[in-house]
Every structure is written in C-alpha cells, then in structure tokens.
Image (cartoon, rainbow, N blue to C red):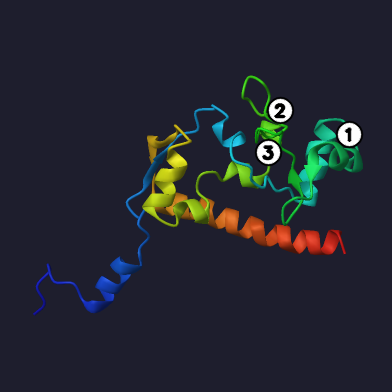
Amino acid sequence: MKNNTENTSEETEDIDRRPWWSGGLHFECLGCGRCCRGEPGGIFVTPEEEKRIAAFLELSADEFRRRYETGRWRFPSVKESRDGRCVMNCPDNRCRVYALRPVTCRTWPFWPEVLASPEAWNAAAAQCPGMNSGPLWEAWQIDAVCQAQVQYMQRLAEAWRKERC
C-alpha cells in the first residue's frame, strides 16, 4: 500500500513542469502609465485595432497609419516619442485610447518574456509599481492572459502577411 506522502514519478514530473509562477503573482494596474513610456518597444496593432482606433480618433485608417504608426518593428506599431513615450500616452499619463488599446497593452505584464523567469519578472517589476502588489492572480488566470498574448502575436503575423502582401 502506497503512503499518501510519497509522490509517484508522474506526480514529480508534473510538479517539475509547473511554471515558477504556479503559486500565482500579484498585480494591479495603478494607471501610472510607466508601461507606456521608457524603453522603446513594439506596441503592435492588428488591422482591426487600427480601424477601431482610427474611427475613435475620427481618422481614416490611412491617416492613422501616417500620423501614429511606425514600421520600425516586425509588425505595424504605435509610434513613440524620442523619450520612448507612446504617442497615445497623454501628459496626465492616461491612455488616449484606453478602451480600445491593443491586446499588447491589455495583456501586460503577463507576456511570455516577462513570465520566463523570476529575474525577468522582477526586472519588469522594477519599472512597474503594480507588479508584486495588488490582488493575487492565480496561475490559471495568468496562463489565460499569457495565452491570449501568444495567440495575438500569431494573429498579427497572419493578418499582416495577408494585409501587406
């Protein structure tokens, strides 16, 4: 008869495969806008996001592209000022298009590269005061948001291959 405190090799393998954040992570967006400024990075947009944001700004998609997008990254991305601030980030640090912000913004900080290790998480947390504070996000919630970001990147690749060929 097996002792209840003993782990089978299968159970041990399952434990070993769990991500470092399997106990959950604390995060709460404080609306500080720090994720919208600083180091440059791609604030990617799908064609659908472009159209929604352009309509909100009362612009054509072409005018939105000319005024607010860059081709600097792998996919079309919202421009940044010289200091790394997203052009949609207002002086009060609020997003001009918050309700329509791209999935890239909506899924922060639960991106695969940020979740890759405790060191990557803590490096990002050094810039984001909402990380390691606020409510506990359970592993299944983190995984769902991370998977949404992964699927979004796949949709970006598919969309822009179709749109810009």
Residue 159's spot in the image, x, y percent?
78, 59
Q: What residue type is labelled 3?
A: Arg
Q: Which of marks 2 and 1 is nearer the N terminus?
A: 1
Identify the amino acid type marked 2. Arg
Q: Residues within 10 Å of mark 2 (few under 14, many from 20)?
A: some
Of 57 and 138, nearer the camera is: 57
Q: What element carries label 3?
A: loop
State the image quarter where residue 108 is shown. Answer: top right
The amino acid type found where label 1 is placed reads Leu
Say if 152 sits above or below 25 in the image.
below
Residue at mark 3: 101
Residue 59 disc label: 1
- Residue 35 quadrant: top right
> Which residue is label 2 attached to?
96
Give x and y (percent) for residue 122: 40, 44
C-alpha gap between disc 2 and disc 1: 14 Å
Q: Where is residue 62 in the image (x, y as percent from the top left)?
A: 91, 43
Question: Seen in the image, is 11 located left or right of residue 145?
Answer: left
